[in-house]
Amino acid sequence: MSETGSPTPLIGRGEDLARLADVLKRARAGEAGALLVAGDAGVGKTRLLDEVAGQAAADGMTVLTGHCVDLGDVGLPYLPFTEILGMLAGDARFASAVDAYPVLGRLLGAGADSAVDSGGRLRLFEGVAGLLAEVADVAPLLVVLEDLHWADQSSRDLLRFLLSRGILQRAAGGAPTHRLAVLASYRADDLHRRHPLRPLLAELVRLPAVERLELRPLADPEVAELVRALQDRPLPDATVRRIVERAEGNAFYAEELVAADTDTGGVPSGLADVLLIRVEQLSDTAQQVLRTAAVAGRRVEHDLLRDAVGLPEDELESALREAIGRQLLVAGGGDTYAFRHALAREAVYADLLPGERARLHGAFARLLEGRGHPGESAAERAHHYRESHDLPEALAASLEAAGHAQRVGAPAEELRHLETALDLWASVDAAARPSGEGADRVTLTLRASAAAAHAGQLHRAVSLTRSALAGIGQDADSELAARVRYTLAGNLMSVDNLTAAFAYSSEALAMIPAEPPSRTWVWAAATHVLAARHMGENETALRVARQALGVAERLGAADAQADLLVSLAILEGGGRRTVAGRERLVAARELARQAGSTPVEMRALFNLAVGCFESGDLEGCLPWVTEGLDRARRAGLLSSLYPLEMRYLHLLVLYTLGRWDECVRAAATDAAVLPSSGGYAVGPALYVALARGDLSAAERARALLEGHFDWMATMVASIALTEAALLQGDTEAAVERARVSIDALTDDSGVRPHIAVRLAALALSAVADAAAELRQAGDTSHRWKDTADELVEVARQTALHGEGDVPQGPEGQAWLARAEAEWARAVSGPDAAAWEKAVAAFGYGDVYERVRCQVRYVEALLAGERREEAAVRAREARAVAERLGATPLLERLDGLIRRGRLADTPAGGERTSPLTAREQDVLRLLALGRSNRQIGEELFITGKTASVHVSNILAKLGAAGRTEAVAIAYREGLIAPERTASS
């Protein structure tokens, strides 16, 4: 039950429910049948049968339910059928039918008589079958038998009779004889090899009228949905993920974990008791083996378990066979055994005595020391040593595991092991700690911060580097102190804290001299170059970069050389958009590759890709993105900063090129593996959704603004939310979103973001729509002119004075052209020349924006009475909009085509309405005498929006008022007269 007391919601069982419903449907039609429902304990058998029983009762079926109960060796015979007969005897509709079978009195007395001779037993079975058949003649009947795995022998025999010779038998002609269905459930995980139900099941499933349904565990998204449905209050995503992971598709386990609502990771006591019952049914030796296996983890190799448990081979095998037979363990490949469910392992582990647990962990740790693949086993050894309280060995193994994770490109695991080592550091005597270069707490913390950054945990990287800074004493080595500061500066830049980053990079550079040359100074300088550029200090950045490049060349520090070349390619000349800039970036990529510096190589590849995009070479961008992501994948760095931005860029190129389906598919693939900090990377899929009319994408975009400020996430959300406001016709919201977003994205030096041109143009589009509506209504107040002037000035200044005062590339200039055209539309009306320029500007490759501008161009051509040109452009635009699936744009274009009579003349002389579908709805209500408020209520729109539609209708029909508009509509055949309630 949920906290509210309502039944547990039925989730993820649509197909199963449909199959059971089909059995009932056939039964109501006279085709008797049975379905055996199998599934593990807790998977949801009872909940499913309850749902089906409820539906059956609602459909007029009689529902009888009998339960089998685990009474051990003193079980009562025929218990579920006694329960069913008791229900019938107590129902006035069937009392006479029960009385007609006196033999059934044996089951309705004080207790069932097990001493029945064979003749009497047959009469008893036939009596039950006859009674159920008579009940089914009155109304369709559903018999539900739960927990057959606990059924006594007599009940099993009676069930065999009913299904093979009794109620499911057919008449001689083969026609069904009863409107009856039997649903019976049993626990598949309880059926060990010698379980008495097994042979009966094998016999029953061969019968033509008997089917079997195995309930699978719920999929992870279904468990997540269940977990959230069980609570009235929202659960944190981390809690939901943890419960989903532990429940492994079992609905009952998920409910128990939700009810416990604990972050400790322990098994709730009630659930532990349920899980341990089966363990306690094992022999002492099998329990010993199971306890030892639980210490090893979810899975254990045979020889490792053998050595740890210390049993002779034959005793071990016998115990394992017993545990597997009871379905507590399952045999796997490579001579391994695994617990059938992780929670069972947790319950057994939690039941160990503290000393027993520590002893077994120590045994496993020592056994693993002598095995091969030391790097791979280091993590296991670290765990076992820590749980056995051997902290020096745990520290050494954790550092070994961290080194192995770094070598195989697993930064998240490296971070976990390093943080474990940091936790252990203070608890281990200095003499017992690892020695050598880098074996100090500060350096270890710096390593952890680098791993966090590579794993995409950017704020954790900042926190760790601040911790390293706090750990530096007054007498600390100046090079180490500088390293900590420039590392902190780099991490702060990744979370957009630019002012603090510049301060720390300045400190780092001042702490050590440029001479004699050192790698530390070079990297401090390279970091300061980045920080200075972000602060708009381009002259400082250029000067330091050129000086540092010379020092890096003298030192032969190829990785730093490559990084500085990337910075200079951005800072010098026309930047990365130019041929010279990209040649320098290619050289930097080669240098970084030769030096084995993957992070610098990815920075070079990212800037090569962005340079192509900014210059309008969209197709040329894709190979660099592909190479960058492949390189990151091979290095295990897909969650780090540049690969995340390359994922976004990849989808953005697909979106811009109009390859929307491909964009959406790639976004779905990416979303499954992105870290929490990389949600923005699938942003272009949100743009697609909005362009196709899916306003729910706005909520997904709004979620990107939660938590720490993130520049990229804010940019993506800003675009999507401004588009959504435009789509909804909410001018104030579109303008406010653009203003707030531009302020939030403006850097600490006051330089507006490049995206300000696009945001200003989108907001201008909403302003122009509002201004056009006012003009149509005869309002000449120019209410929106000041706002339009403000926005177009933002677009002009940003596009013409971009980074380093260099004008933006083709994309920025195209958005500026659209902003200018929207401004003209807002202040004076459609300007064909301005829209023609905008269409041409987006011709560099932005398919959707080009067609959006083309629709406005058609509008302007119509206003200038250039219908033939408008018709050609409209046909072109419609084909593209239809291919993209851009439904809102398509609807607007179709309305324009109707109003402008741009379509070919319809066959048969049919008239084409100049009104949109929504305007037709408003007109119909107008004809019924509805007010604007009433129209709004009926169409689920605001009264203000209804008023706008009415104004549009009057303008399109050339009517002076509502009455005249309705008269014109009747005359033109746009609406048919409707009968009112009084007529």
Image (cartoon, rainbow, N blue to C red):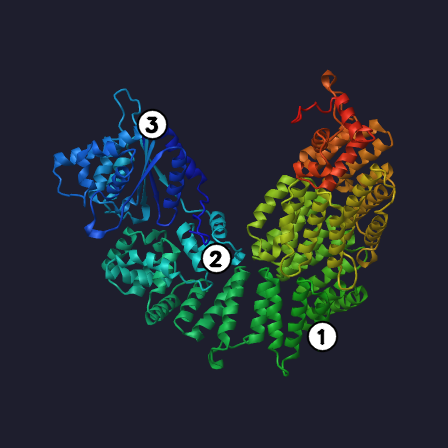
Q: What residue is rendered at 19% in x and 51% in y?
A: 74
Question: Above or below — where is 138 with respect to 436?
Answer: above
- Amino acid type, callout 3: Glu
On the rendered structure, is 648 left or right of 196?
Answer: right
* Residue 509 appears in view: yes
Decide which of 632, 929 is in the foreground and name it: 929
- The secondary structure type at the circle numbered 3 is loop
Q: Position of residue 789 (x, y in %)?
A: 85, 50
Residue drawn at x 58%, y 49% as measured from the top left: 670
Image point 61% across, 76% down: which residue? 470
Q: Point out which mark residue 549 bears.
A: none
On screen, residue 354 above or below 252: below
Circle 2 packing at 10 Å, graded few (<14), some (14-19), many (20+), is some
| Disc number placed over residue 242 in the picture, else none | 2
Tag nearer the camera, 1 or 2 = 2
Name the residue beneath numbered marker 1.
507
Categorize mark 1 by other alpha carbons within 10 Å: few (<14), some (14-19), many (20+): some
Q: What residue did someone put label 3 on?
A: 31
Q: Alpha carbon of mark 3 to alpha carbon of mark 2: how far?
A: 46 Å
Q: CA distance from mark 1 to mark 2?
A: 42 Å
On the image, which quarter does residue 122 sit in? top left
